[in-house]
Image (cartoon, coloured by chain):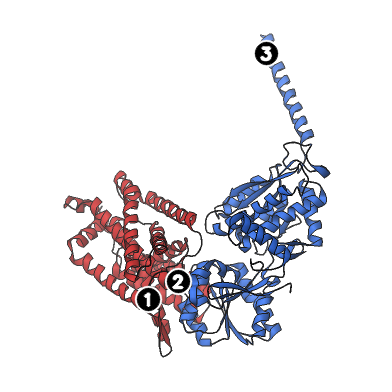
Amino acid sequence: MKEPRLFAQNRIRMFGAALAASALALTACSDGGSSATEDDSGGGEGLPSVITLSVIKELTGSAGFAGESALEGIELAIEEINDTDFLGEDVEVRPDVQDTASNTQTAVTMVGQAATNPDFAAILGPSNSDAGQAVAPIAQRAGIPLVFSQSLGDGILVGDYIFRVNAPLDSYSGLAWDYMADEGIETVSILYNSTSVRQSQGATEMSPAFAEERGIEILSSTGIPVTSTDFTAAAAQVANEEPDAVVYFMAGAQHVTAVQQVRRAGFEGALIGGSGIEAGLETVGEDGDGIVWATDYNYLWQNESALAFTDAYVAKYGENPLSYAAEAYDSVWWIARGLEESGDASHAGVQQGLTTVAEAGFDGAQGPLTFEDNDARTVGVLIQWIGGEQVLLRAGDE
Amino acid sequence: MIDVIVNSLTLASIYFLFAVGMSLVWGSIGVLNFAHGGIFMASAFGCFLILDEVALPLLGVMAVGMVIGGVLAALVQFVAFGPILTRERDRHAGEFQIIAAGIGLASVIVALAQKRFNEPFGLSASTFEIRAFRIGELVVTNIALIIIGLAVLLGTGLTLWLRRSIQGTALRSIGVDPTTASLMGINRPRMALLAMVTSGVLAGLAGSLLTLYLGAIETTSGDALIIKAFAIIVLGGVGSVAGAVVGSVVLALAETLLLTYSSGTWVDAASFGLIFVILLVRPRGIFGRKEVRRT
């Protein structure tokens, strides 16, 4: 029965040849890091007609409020880039949005998939520091640019494909310490969230340095885990120390509780909060009257580029933006400037463009931005809560 | 030292109000209710939404919290725990499913709340004004005194109800031997519902009072308290109100002392450390009952 066997063997050979030819063709067509193109004949300077950014943010879950605000900033920036033909008449930027649900493992899966998807020019990474630490190495190994807004922990900027548009606390927190020195504050007590690396570093590393420079004495520094619901003991301790000011490094409901309980414990001095107090100002009520905090952006800032962002945001969304929106807005514009610079939407091209733009710095929603090793630095603003209103005390660019 | 004691008492009262409902349900109908934290938060969240429309006094806020808690707990029993317990031959067979269902339901409750409003929320729109009183070095607020008073009242009331009333005795008998209890004419599904609703009412009360006391909570605040409640129940003994009291006081005192005299970073270690030690030394807890195994 040689004829059927020969026929089967021929079929196998033909199939194998077809497979090899297909593989060859695919290899010839593929490019190690090209971005999405619906039409390769796209815009000027070699940019494709469609550039897709993978947006992986916490839109629900515990950090959902930050992610939602960030997404608004991203969508505003993309709208502006497209409407003004910033990258060319026929070039359109599109977001591909995914929700991590504030889950680190989900973020890892999403970034892993995005990193191997040739359709994405870059990734806008999650805000949560834990997720940031987990996904940064993935993006670096895959050679796809990843820009973080938030994600302020250590061990995130692991290579030249990782960028961050949020300034670390010490970039602008000096404003609050200068304020304290100007007000004649000589002693402070610190309360901080001991679960958060960023807050802990702010309290235990940054604050002593700032305090020493200004001749301010730190009477105590009390760490409280994020799972603690009651700070009565810590508040009583702080009130008994009678410092001139209480400095907080906290976020969310903890911040509100800590402020209220310190006041109830009888403390009447100055309160210096973290930028996390903004979300709880309405809830903290009268107890928070007079609280001062430094932040990288506020809608009251009259800096030209910050104000342009604020006006555009209010026009689109009808409310004042939070700092998360400003930071994410800057992350998109950084990429856009990088694309314009390099004229190349491949991963290597975007990376090169981002790096070049970072070397020069640019004016964004967070004001004048400079960078150290692809990590943003900003001048910040100092805000006070008085009589139920936010008041701009000073700006770092004055 | 007096302020440490008072602070510990307040914290213990909060823990007790939260944990006693969970202990009651676990000890009677054998349900380890991981939806308890979600019910706690949802009760407070419901109060927050209602206060956005109408300012309520303290009693009104408490009542709203308790109603929401009771209704949610009843729903959880109808939708999840009841069918699971009915389907399985005995409660041990359904334990894993109960835990999974509780965690799942809590996630749904939290997600729904976050969809509506995902920032810290408080009950400051209530007409109730929190005042602080200074007695020498000690500062105490009116809400703290109310929480302590209610915890004492409820602890006493629950103990008497469980020991002296027919329903309480029936509930305890289900906890000892559900089969025999059924044979004695006790309606297990009805008693299970009663236990869950009672637990939900207590969670709702804890939610409204704790939110007033702290000023604000978050949609995930119930999760942290579940761990504390677990430590308290293990320490005090499953199903024992006295055990919940002792467990709450011990945990609160340990945490307050750590926070006052050491570093706050050890506070969580206290919760887990206590669970570990008690499981080694006295697995059934201080007031837990011995299990009788028939051969």
Q: Amino acid at mark 2?
A: Gly
Camera-side residue of A49 and B273:
A49
The image shows residue A175 at horizontal and vertical percentages of 68, 76
Q: Amino acid at mark 1?
A: Ile
Is residue B55 shown above or below B260?
above
Comparing labels 2 and 3, the label whose residue is closer to the camera: 2
> In which image quadrant can residue B4 be found?
bottom left
Q: Residues within 10 Å of mark 2 (few under 14, many from 20)?
A: many
Note whether residue B166 is visible: yes
Which residue is label 2 attached to? B215
The CA distance from mark 2 to mark 1 is 11 Å
Q: Amino acid at mark 3?
A: Arg
Q: Secondary structure at mark 2?
A: loop
Which residue is label 3 attached to? A5
Note whether residue A149 is visible: no
The CA distance from mark 2 to mark 3 is 83 Å
Pinpoint the chain carrying mark 3: A
Chain shaded red: B
Comparing labels 1 and 3, the label whose residue is closer to the camera: 1
Residue B143 — which label? 1
Quadrant in which the C terminus of chain A appears? bottom right
Residue B185 in the figure: left or right of residue A176: left
Pinpoint the chain carrying mark 2: B
Query: CB under 8 Å between callouts 2 and 3?
Result: no
Chain shaded blue: A
The CA distance from mark 1 to mark 3 is 90 Å
Whether discs 2 and 3 lie on one chain: the answer is no
Q: Residue at x 52, y 84 (%)?
A: A268
Pinpoint the chain carrying mark 1: B
